[in-house]
Amino acid sequence: MNRSAPMPVPKRSAGSPSATAPASETLALQGLPGWLRTPAVPGPAATEAAFAAGATLALLDHLMRQDPPELGVWRMRQALTAATACAAWLRLRTDLAGLRDAEHLTRAGDDPGPAGRLHRAWRRLAAEPLRDPLTVPARLAPLLGIPTGLVAPASGPAREAADHPVAAAAAAADLTLRSVPVPTPEIEILAWMMADATLAHRLGWSAPVPLLATAVLHASLRQGSERRRPQPGTAGWLTACHAAYARAAADAHGRAQDLLRRGERLRAALPAARFRGRDRGLALFLADDAVAPPRLVGTGSDRAARRFCDRLVALGAVRELTGRPTFRLYGL
């Protein structure tokens, strides 16, 4: 099986926490209060949904501003979650494991297939620094199979719709769908990406975090009913966005807590795993959802890299993600 090109390890800015610093020194992330989670019943009241969205996003904003090294793997896990939900909605024949394989075991330059391109679009949204949300269609539309230039959202209403970031995100999604004569499912996915990009821009985050798609699709995937899926431009869309962002931010907050704990375990176990490239290995595990041993070959042999990863598994520091004897992938 082939593999993709190595994903660059992001450089940390001056003054940012070191990748080798203990997670406890980087961020103490408290648990999400139970009362912040939106009700399980459909259609929460507008004021209740807006309050829950503001509170959960404020806690997520605290995480983003602390900028722990685990933000890289966290964003990629969010991208994988969004891609898995979208692939199921589009009825693509793949699952979470298949999306991982398409990304990490496809040779650079080869086509990972429709599902792989969908996953790659979400990864690109989450990985690249965001300067202007209006650049998102040009960067991601080709990966979604949307003709270049078809979607060109107007800038004014999306930026001036409201001061509240969720209202601006909802307006951006609506504008994206209304910019084309006949919206397709792929364009609706792009609309959710535009919403996440706009939200990140309004909150001052360095890069978007995939949030809206998974929460919006939750009801329709669970119930098997398209009619239960809220759509941009319909009555109640803003309330649906508030409820979706509250739910998605709560789930993302819990995932961040788990990854911070896993990152701390990895740092503690690293001295017991002898490998010439272990510092690079640490950086890769903190930056991406999954790591194939050949990505560590630049600092040692392929066999040594596999032994290093297996040693970390034995120490409880990382997990083997595939369950296969060959073509294995490892991650927090």
Image (spheres, rainbow, N blue to C red):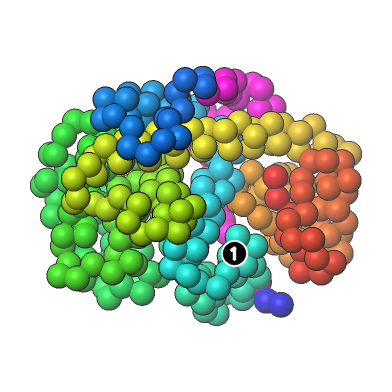
The residue identified by callout 1 is 95
- Secondary structure of the residue carrying numbered label 1: loop
Any part of residue 250 in sight: yes
Residue 23 in which image quadrant: top right
Magenta span contains residue 6: yes
Numbered range of the magenta stretch: 3-32
| 208 or 58: nearer the viewer | 58
Question: Is 11 situated left or right of 40 in this image?
Answer: right
Q: Residue at x 64, y 44 (%)?
A: 286
How many residues crowd around disc 1 within 10 Å: few (fewer than 14), some, or many (20 or more)? some
Q: Residue at image x 19%, y 31%?
A: 163
Is residue 10 visible in the rendered image? The answer is no
Q: Main secondary structure of the magenta part?
A: loop
Task: Tell me which amino acid carries mark 1.
Answer: Asp
Tell me: residue 283, above or below residue 113: above
Quadrant housing the N terminus: bottom right
Closer-to-camera residue (98/75): 98
- Which residue is more in the foreground, 261 or 236? 236
103 horizontally vs 86: left or right: right
| 59 sits left or right of 290 in the view | left
State which quadrant residue 100 falls in.
bottom right
Relative image position of residue 247 (x, y in whole percent): 44, 36
Q: Where residue 45 sits: x, y (%)?
A: 29, 29
Q: Nearer the viewer, residue 281 or 233?
A: 233
- Quarter of the image with the C terminus in it: top right
Residue 124 pos. (x, y %): 44, 58
